[in-house]
């Protein structure tokens, strides 16, 4: 009778891990290739190209976006416009130094603004009123050299002066705002030019992601090993049963000889 057979060798963990890694990489590569679909729209196209491999041998791809001729022309015009705005901003920014080196006399600026307002708004009104006042006094028979005439015109002048003063007080805030606006306008224009010439960040295509579950190589290997143990276990059980039967037959034979009265000679 042969000795019991040795069990099948257990799987090599390193070999199993390497096989699992290779399967995962293969699954991910196939899924990536399925996801990288070239696209074409009225505005342009997106194409994937393999341009080599990584250190582990997996393919390396690049995505290329190409604009349609019409969109490419608009893109070029936009770049040229931004370049022009940027150059204008550079040219005009040299003036900021001179502007900022000139102190702003806000009181003088306000006085100038108020004087302009008075000249444009109040002077025509009060000039007409003065003419009306002089006509009224003349129609009343007052001599321009008389004291009554002088008093009436003095009252008129007081009203006019108070009107100018009230207008100046009321318009001081507005005049200050206008003066500051004129001061800041060149700076705001240059800032706007610089904002229009900012670099546009590129939009990249989304990298395809894998979603297929990899093959469970480790699980399959372990299940195969367990299945290989089944015949070995069955053979061992058969051998054990056979040995048990032979020992039982031997015991029965020895017991039969004693029962027949056979005696061994001395």
Image: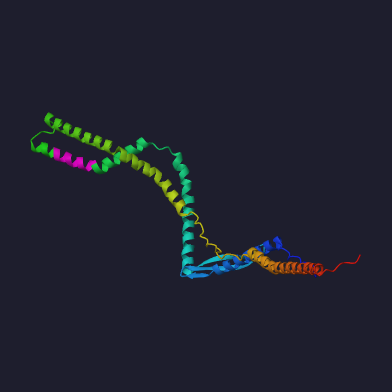
Residue 132 visible in the snapshot: yes
Q: Is residue 121 above or below residue 20?
A: above
Question: Residue 32 at what x, y percent from top left?
Answer: 57, 66
> Split into 4 quadrants, where in the image is the C terminus?
bottom right
User: For this rendering, which residue is in front, 162 or 47?
Assistant: 47
Name the spot of residue 208 as percent of width and height, x first. Answer: 54, 64
Whether residue 182 sits left or right of residue 162 in the image: it is right
Q: Nearer the viewer, residue 223 or 190?
A: 223
Tell me where residue 120 sits by quadrant. Answer: top left
Q: Using the image, determine if residue 151 lies above or below residue 136.
A: above
**Percent position of residue 46, x then y:** 52, 67
Mostly what secondary structure, the magenta segment? helix
Considering every residue shown, the one lying at the far right of the view is 266
Q: Quadrant of residue 148?
A: top left
Q: Residue furthest front?
A: 261
Q: Which residues are magenta?
A: 122-133
Q: Nearer the viewer, residue 264 or 226?
A: 264
Residue sitting at x 35%, y 35%: 107
Residue at 43% across / 46% down in the picture? Answer: 187
The quarter holding residue 256 reads bottom right
Residue 217 at what x, y percent from top left?
Answer: 64, 65
Work out which quarter of the rendered image holds the N terminus and state it: bottom right
Q: Is residue 170 magenta?
A: no
């Amino acid at each position: 009778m042969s000795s019991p057979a040795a069990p099948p060798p257990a799987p090599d963990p390193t070999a199993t891990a390497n096989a699992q890694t290779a399967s995962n990489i293969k699954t991910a590569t196939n899924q990536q290739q399925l996801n990288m679909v070239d696209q074409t729209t009225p505005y342009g196209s997106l194409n994937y190209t393999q341009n080599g491999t990584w250190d582990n041998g997996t393919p390396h791809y690049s995505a290329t976006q190409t604009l349609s001729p019409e969109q490419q022309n608009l893109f070029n015009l936009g770049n040229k416009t931004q370049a022009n705005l940027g150059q204008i901003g550079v040219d005009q920014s040299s003036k900021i130094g001179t502007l900022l080196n000139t102190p702003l006399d806000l009181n003088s600026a306000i006085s100038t603004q108020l004087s302009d307002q008075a000249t444009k708004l109040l002077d025509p009104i009060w000039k007409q009123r003065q003419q009306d006042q002089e006509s009224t006094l003349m129609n009343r028979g007052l001599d321009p050299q008389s004291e009554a005439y002088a008093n009436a015109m003095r009252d008129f002048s007081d009203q006019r002066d108070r009107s100018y003063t009230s207008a100046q007080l009321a318009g001081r805030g507005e005049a200050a705002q206008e003066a500051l606006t004129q001061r800041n306008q060149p700076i705001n224009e240059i800032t706007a030019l610089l904002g229009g010439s900012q670099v546009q960040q590129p939009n990249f295509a989304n990298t395809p992601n894998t979603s297929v579950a990899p093959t469970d190589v480790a699980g399959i290997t372990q299940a195969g090993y367990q299945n290989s143990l089944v015949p070995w276990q069955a053979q061992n059980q058969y051998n054990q049963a056979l040995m048990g039967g032979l020992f039982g037959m031997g015991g029965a034979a020895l017991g039969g000889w004693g029962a027949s009265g056979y005696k061994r000679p001395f």
